[in-house]
Amino acid sequence: PLVVGKEVLDKARREGYAVPSFNTNNLEITQAILEVAEELKAPVFIQVSDGARKYAGMENLANLVKDMASRVRVPVVLHLDHGADFAMVMQALRAGFTSVMIDASHHPLEENVRETRKVVEAAHAVGVSVEAELGRLQGIEDNVQVSEAEAFLTDPEEAERFVAETGIDYLAIAIGTSHGAYKGKGRPYIDHRRLQEIARRVSLPLVLHGASGVPAWLKEKLLATGAEVKEATGIHDEDIQKAIPNGIAKINIDTDLRLAMTLGIREVVVGNPREFDPRKIIGKGRDYLKQVIREKFQLMRTVGRA
Ligand code: G3H
Ligand code: 13P
Ligand code: ZN
């Protein structure tokens, strides 16, 4: 069934595992997420981004997820990813989301606090949980001094104050990850010490954005189809495993799903040019999606937590 975000994440932080939050854009992605969650008895977040809303329509996606979630046994949270402003959040509340993110992290702190508070008041009035972000997500390249990059990372003291002043339910933080398939050269730098310091001061579930791993098997297979993804790199599994006992309870994954879907499509289209049944083409994408999603639940220790 569809449930409220806070219940799922408070339990995750308390018990030391994380819940993946997968982006959906269509039927097949939603199916892959829910089928695997059900198979592994795992709670799950399904999130809708701005791009998803423009591509598929907010109401269409919300109704799809709500309907499908009502027919599975595991807890499913319908979440607004990177809500741009109060109006966007209101639309999500109206569409039946059970969790919303207000991302005012690019504004000055005072404005971030003000906008976030407004959203908390509205969302809590209808029993919906709120995520907000402090700090800015940005890849840290090898050639950039860490001290320079630190300006964008979440400040632990500020995080403590932000949580107290806003009344949010979970906090997205910047500790070195970034969105997309190109997270810097080699192993992206993750500031685990900063995370520990934030977790010491903030008892709420913490959220990690930009957490895709660009799995080696996926990249190899993609390269074999002629896809140009040689420079793609993600967050290492060990960094994810290390972050979870330090309070990370929600982990956002989009890029790995994009890669998996594209791999399936490319394998069929490139390898079998006579095929033109979209179900065969997209269906292979859905198979790879399920494989990646299964690996994420295992990595985050979500299996059997429903
Ligand atoms: O946070 C970014 C997600 O990967 C979604 O991106 O707005 O292009 O769907 P999108
Ligand atoms: P990735 O691009 O690493 O999958 O991150 C997705 C994300 O943070 C969505 O909010
Ligand atoms: Zn994000």
Image (spheres, grey):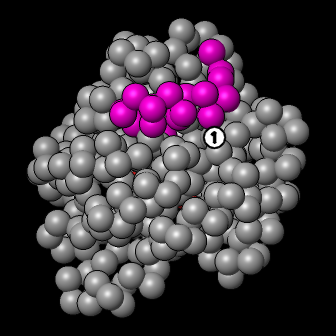
Residue under the point 65% across and 23% down = 3
The answer to whether residue 35 is visible is no
The reply to whether the magenta stretch includes residue 101 is no
Which structural element holds mark 1?
strand
The magenta segment is 1-23
Q: Is 180 positioned to the left or the right of 44 in the image?
A: left
The answer to whether residue 188 is visible is yes
State the residue position of label 1.
Answer: 79
Q: Is residue 14 above or below residue 52?
A: above
Could you say which is closer to the camera, residue 1 or residue 170?
170
x, y percent for residue 225: 17, 50
Q: Is residue 136 above or below residue 89?
A: below
Could you say which is closer to the camera, residue 21 or residue 29?
21
x, y percent for residue 261: 36, 41
Residue under the point 23% across and 68% down = 188
Residue under the point 52% across and 47% down = 203
The reply to whether the magenta stretch includes residue 6 is yes
Could you say which is closer to the camera, residue 98 or residue 268?
98
